[in-house]
């Protein structure tokens, strides 16, 4: 499983990061609505986890055009 995620991330770069972050945001929002306020991750509070994921998703979305240009230069 980890190798598959690593391969997808290697091939798709910020597109994969945006997708994985979005899936995690949806899951954490659903968990908060269900009453889960603490996460087992290092950040602990689910609000902090959501803030972290939103920052990652925003940075990934901003990086996508640059990543596409990089691939266009490499392939063209």
Image: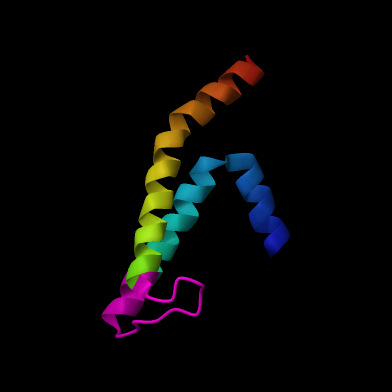
Query: Residue farthest to the right?
Result: 3
The image quarter in which residue 30 lies: bottom left
Residue 18 in the image: x percent, y percent? 45, 48
> At which x and y percent is residue 65?
44, 28
Q: Which residues are magenta?
A: 28-46
Q: Is residue 43 magenta?
A: yes
- Using the rendered image of the protein, determine whether residue 26 is visible from the camera's viewpoint: no
Q: On screen, 60 above or below 24?
A: above
**Horizontal placement of 64 versus 30: left or right?**
right
x 72%, y 58%: residue? 3
Residue 35 image position (x, y, % from top left): 30, 85
- Residue ID at (51%, 72%): 42
Quarter location, residue 31: bottom left
Q: Where does residue 52 sit, x and y in percent of width and height?
A: 40, 59
Asked if 32 appears above or below 12 in the picture, the reply is: below
Q: Residue at x 69, y 62 (%)?
A: 2
Q: Nearer the viewer, residue 17 or 54?
A: 54
- Residue 36 is one of the magenta-drawn residues: yes
Q: Quadrant of the N terminus?
A: bottom right
Task: Evaluate whether residue 57 shows in this view.
Answer: yes
Residue that sits furthest to the front in the current view: 43
As drawn, is 41 to the left or to the right of 34? right
Q: Nearer the viewer, residue 34 or 43?
A: 43
Magenta stretch, main secondary structure, is: loop
What residue lies at 41% left-to-right and 58% top-to-bottom?
53
């Amino acid at each position: 499983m980890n190798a598959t995620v690593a391969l997808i991330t290697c091939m798709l770069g910020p597109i994969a990061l945006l997708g994985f972050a979005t899936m995690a945001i949806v899951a954490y929002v659903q968990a908060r609505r269900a009453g889960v306020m603490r996460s087992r991750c290092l950040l602990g509070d689910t609000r902090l986890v959501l803030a972290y994921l939103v920052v990652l998703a925003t940075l990934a979305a901003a990086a996508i055009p640059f990543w596409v240009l990089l691939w266009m230069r490499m392939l063209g």
